[in-house]
Amino acid sequence: MLEIPQGGDIVFKGEAVSWTDKTDHRQLSDKNQIIKFRTNLSMVFQSFNLWSHLSILDNVIEAPVTVLGKDRQRMREAAYTLLDKVGIADKANAWPAQLSGGQQQRAAIARALAMEPDALLFDEPTSALDPELEQEVVKVIKDLASEGRTMLLVTHDMQLARDLSDQVLFLHQGIVEEEGVPDILFEKPKSTRLKQFLSAAAN
C-alpha cells in the first residue's frame, strides 16, 4: 500500500484490506490480495504522473499489457477509442511534454480507464490547472459520471463536488465532519466548519 492506515477498517467488495485486530494492532491483507484489489481500482493524480519517456498511446496501453497481460495490438485499438472518448485521439503519438495540462490530465484519465476498473479514484484532478483547462477535464469527468461509473473524488472545488456527487463527505484534518447528499449538505450544513468553508468558498 502507498500509505499505511493509522486507524479504521478498509473493506473493498466485501473483503477486508486493512483492519484493527482485538489487540489494537494494524493488520493488512497479504500482498497478493492487495495486488488483486489494486487491479480493480484506477487512480488519476493531481500532477498527471504520465511516463515522460512514453508516447500518450503507450502511456495508455502499458499497464493493461504489463499488469493484466492484455494483447498489445488489441490494447492499441482500445487505447485509440479511449483517447477519442476524452477528446485527444489526435495526440496519441505525442509526448506528454507536448501536451497542455488539461490534455495531460485527460490522457491520465484514459490511462486509468484502460484498466477497466470497478472504481476510479481522482485526487484533486483539476487543482493544478488554470480555469480554461480545468473545464476540459471537468467535462470528461461529468461524462464519466453520467455513465454511472463508481468514482471517488477528492476536491476543494465545491461546485464540482455538487455537480458530480451522489454522496459528499466533508473532511477536516482526516476526520469526517459531515456527510450527506449534495442538495442537503450544501444548502443546510450542520457543521460549523463546513458552514465556514462554504462561506469562504462563496467569497
Image: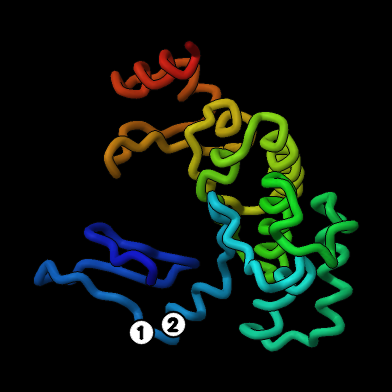
60 horizontally vs 16: left or right: right
The x and y percentages for residue 11 are 40, 64
x 65%, y 63%: residue? 112
Label drawn at residue 152? none
Q: Work out whether 192 lies above or below 95.
A: above
- Could you say which quadrant of the image residue 162 lies in? top right
Q: Amino acid at mark 2?
A: Gln
User: In the picture, which quadrant includes the N terminus?
Assistant: bottom left
Residue 126, quarter of the rendered image: top right
Q: Residues within 10 Å of mark 1 (few under 14, many from 20)?
A: few
Contact? badges 1 and 2 (CB < 8 Å): yes
CA gap, disc 1 to disc 2? 5 Å
Residue wearing tag 2: 33
What residue sits 27% from the left and 68% below the top?
19
Residue 30's disc is: 1
Q: Relative to residue 63, is residue 103 depicted above or below?
A: above
**Which of 56/165 is in front?**
56
| Callout 1 amino acid | Asp
Numbered label tally: 2
